[in-house]
Structure formats: structure tokens, C-alpha cells
Image: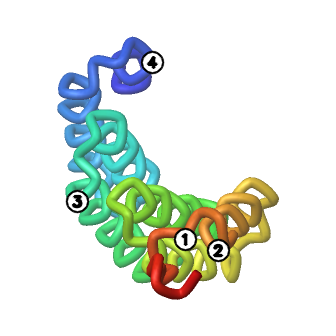
């Protein structure tokens, strides 16, 4: 049911169902990842990061599939990007790529390090012209 609510963008109900599923299967990170995705959909990026960290913790303790771990780490990178934390996003993308070489994550990492995406960090003064 959680996936149906997620697809309908009813993220609160999706979270409710994913949490119930996670309680029934506490060693699976799939449901925790789904909760994180729903928080991302609600633009609750800090909560998304919190759930992703929990998913990685549970996943490492229970030897979760490396693709699921990579998904958690990449989602943390996406949330960090939304928060404007480019350095943190790059770190999480790198961590994700160490688990699984996903071409989409490689692309997102390139976007995060691209000089034009970091123009705000370049010191500029009209006096230097």
C-alpha cells in the first residue's frame, strides 16, 4: 500500500505504511529507504538524511544488498544537494559509488563538482576587473 500512496504523492500515508512494514521487518533497509524517499518527496531533506543514515546503519549491521546501501547514500547526496551542501553531496555520492557504480549517481556527482554549479563560491570583485 505504501508504494500506491507514494505514486499518488500522498507521502504522509506512504510513510505511515512504510513504517508499519519496517516494524514487521526491522532488518530490511528497503522500507527505511522508502520512508526516506517519501520525506524527500515532501521536501523534508533533513528527515530524509536522517532516515538514510538509519538505513545505512541497519544495512551494514545486517549485510544488506550493496545496491540498497548505494541507494541510501545517493539519496543522502540528493538531499544534501537540495540543501545546498555541495561538499556533503559529493561525499555521499562518492560513498554511494564505492558501493555500486551507478551511472546516474556518477552523473549527479559530476553536476555537483562542475565549476558552473559552484559559481557562488568564486570570489568576485569589480575592482579586480
Q: Mark 1 points at which residue?
A: 118
Residue 46 bears which disc, if any? 3
Way the structure is coloured? rainbow
SS category of the residue bearing label 2: helix
Residue at 21% in and 49% down: 23
Residue 7 bears which disc, if any? 4
| Callout in the foreground (2, 1) | 1
Image coords of residue 106 (percent x, y): 75, 66
Residue that protrudes farthest toward the top in the picture: 8
SS category of the residue bearing label 3: helix
Q: Say which label, 4 or 2, has the lower sequence index.
A: 4
Q: Mark 2 points at which residue?
A: 113
Asked whether disc 4 touches disc 2, contact meaning CB atoms under 8 Å apart, the reply is no
Q: Say which label, 3 or 1, has the lower sequence index.
A: 3
Image coords of residue 90 (percent x, y): 56, 77
Quadrant placement of the N terminus: top left
Q: Say which label, 4 or 1, has the lower sequence index.
A: 4
- Cα–Cα span, label 2 and label 3: 22 Å
103, above or below 125, in the image: above
Residue at 24% in and 65% down: 50
| Callout in the foreground (3, 4) | 3
Q: Say which label, 2 or 1, has the lower sequence index.
A: 2
How crowded pointer 2 is (Cα within 10 Å; few <14, some 14-19, many 20+) is rated as: some
Image coords of residue 84 (percent x, y): 37, 63
Name the residue nearer the viewer: 68 or 79. Answer: 79
Q: Say which label, 3 or 4, has the lower sequence index.
A: 4
- Cα–Cα span, label 3 and label 4: 22 Å
| Callout in the foreground (4, 1) | 1
Residue at 39% in and 12% down: 8
Asked whether disc 2 touches disc 1, contact meaning CB atoms under 8 Å apart, the reply is yes
SS category of the residue bearing label 4: helix
- Cα–Cα span, label 4 and label 1: 33 Å
Amino acid at each position: 500500500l505504501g508504494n500506491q500512496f507514494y505514486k499518488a504523492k500522498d507521502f504522509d500515508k506512504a510513510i505511515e505504511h512504510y513504517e508499519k512494514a519496517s516494524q514487521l521487518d526491522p532488518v530490511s533497509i528497503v522500507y527505511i529507504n522508502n520512508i526516506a524517499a517519501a520525506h524527500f518527496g515532501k521536501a523534508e531533506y533533513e528527515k530524509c538524511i536522517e532516515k538514510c543514515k538509519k538505513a545505512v546503519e541497519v544495512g551494514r549491521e545486517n549485510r544488506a544488498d550493496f545496491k540498497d546501501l548505494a541507494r541510501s547514500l545517493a539519496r543522502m547526496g540528493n538531499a544534501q544537494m537540495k540543501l545546498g551542501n555541495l561538499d556533503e553531496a559529493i561525499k555521499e555520492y562518492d560513498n554511494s559509488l564505492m558501493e555500486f557504480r551507478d551511472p546516474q549517481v556518477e552523473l549527479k556527482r559530476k553536476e555537483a563538482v562542475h565549476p558552473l554549479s559552484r559559481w557562488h563560491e568564486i570570489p568576485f570583485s569589480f575592482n579586480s576587473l
